């Protein structure tokens, strides 16, 4: 449907429809790539990817966010001047397309509303969000039936673009931090090291590295200096149990 929006947005000279097309295209890309990448992400670790394939989902999310950011930025730059020099639009076409879009989104939201999974609930909210956006397009088209306030069209496109950027930029930044292997949010390495030092037989933490594969599955490698190597097995088990409480599942412990 986003392709139809691009075509008729250009035909109707409506930047608001084009902005909504970018939004819908990004969402469709996110849904499709997420479903595709999930098949890779669920694959078990192997010799080629010893930590698994979780990063495939992050890669798809980064690509989608990049497309949304670039597309919305272009529409934003293009339409700021149009606020001061607005062009006539086909308000009748906007109205018809808006009604069709609301019917499609409402039907889709009803279909996924019956589902109980987390993804289905998110999709339902997304379709309702789209309905609100198209209601705004319909409102503008109705106003333009009686006035020549053509600046409303670029104004609405700017609002939609800013909304997309407000969603895409934080997501892109969070996914980028995962790619750069930042310590997961909610875990402070210094505090974690102090907690591990409180474990009997741990003399010092030589090295501690914590990162996340996808924001949910965390990993850690650490080098620990022990007081008594005869108790290494029991000490490692205590360290492992402590790390698991932080959601760290893939753990490599070296003792010196």
Image: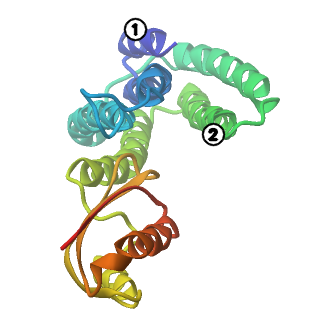
Q: Which mark is residue 95?
A: none
* Image position, residue 147 (x, y; %): 52, 33
Element assignment for label 1 = helix
Q: Nearer the viewer, mark 1 or mark 2?
A: 2
Q: Which residue is mark 1?
A: 7
In the rendered view, would you say 250 is above or below 137?
Answer: below
Q: Please name the colour scheme applied to the rendered image.
A: rainbow
Across and down, in percent, residue 197 comes to 33, 88
Instruction: Tell me what residue is drawn at x 24 percent, y 39 percent.
Output: 73
Residue situated furthest right in the rendering: 114
- Quarter holding the C terminus is bottom left
Residue 42: percent from left, percent from top: 48, 29
The reply to whether residue 253 is in sight is yes
Q: Assess disc 2: are there few (<14), some (14-19) or many (≥20) residues with their C-alpha within 10 Å of its C-alpha.
A: few
In the figure, 129 relative to 188: above or below? Answer: above
Q: Is residue 149 left or right of residue 165?
A: right
Q: Quadrant of residue 61?
A: top left
- In the depicted view, which residue is nearer to us: 147 or 247? 247
Numbered badge on residue 122: 2
Q: Position of residue 14 (x, y in %)?
A: 40, 23
- The answer for how far apart the CA atoms under marks 1 and 2 are is 28 Å
Q: Measured along the vertical axis of the image, is residue 52 above or below residue 6?
A: below
Above or below, 197 relative to 230: below
Q: Earlier in the sequence, mark 1 or mark 2?
A: 1
State which quadrant residue 87 falls in: top left
The residue under the point 31% across, 49% down is: 169
């Amino acid at each position: 449907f986003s392709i139809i929006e691009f075509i008729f947005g250009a035909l109707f000279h409506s930047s608001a429809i084009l902005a909504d097309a970018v939004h819908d295209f990004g969402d469709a890309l996110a849904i499709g790539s997420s479903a595709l990448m999930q098949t890779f992400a669920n694959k078990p670790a192997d010799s080629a990817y010893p930590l698994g394939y979780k990063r495939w989902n992050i890669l798809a999310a980064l690509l989608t966010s990049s497309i949304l950011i670039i597309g919305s930025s272009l529409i934003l730059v293009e339409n700021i001047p149009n606020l001061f020099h607005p062009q006539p639009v086909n308000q009748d076409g906007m109205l018809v397309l808006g009604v069709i879009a609301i019917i499609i989104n409402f039907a889709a939201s009803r279909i996924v509303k019956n589902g109980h999974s987390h993804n289905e609930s998110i999709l339902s909210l997304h379709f309702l969000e789209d309905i609100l956006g198209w209601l705004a397009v319909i409102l503008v088209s109705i106003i333009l039936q009686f006035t020549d306030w053509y600046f409303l069209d670029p104004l609405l496109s700017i609002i939609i673009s800013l909304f997309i950027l407000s969603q895409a930029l934080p997501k892109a930044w969070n996914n980028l931090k995962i790619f750069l292997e930042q310590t997961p949010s909610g875990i402070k390495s210094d505090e974690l090291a102090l907690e591990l030092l409180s474990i009997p037989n741990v003399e010092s933490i030589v090295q501690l590295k914590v990162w996340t594969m996808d924001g949910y599955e965390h990993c850690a490698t650490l080098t620990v200096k022990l007081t008594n190597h005869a108790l290494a097995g029991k000490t490692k088990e205590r360290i492992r149990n402590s790390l698991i409480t932080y959601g760290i599942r893939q753990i490599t412990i070296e003792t010196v």
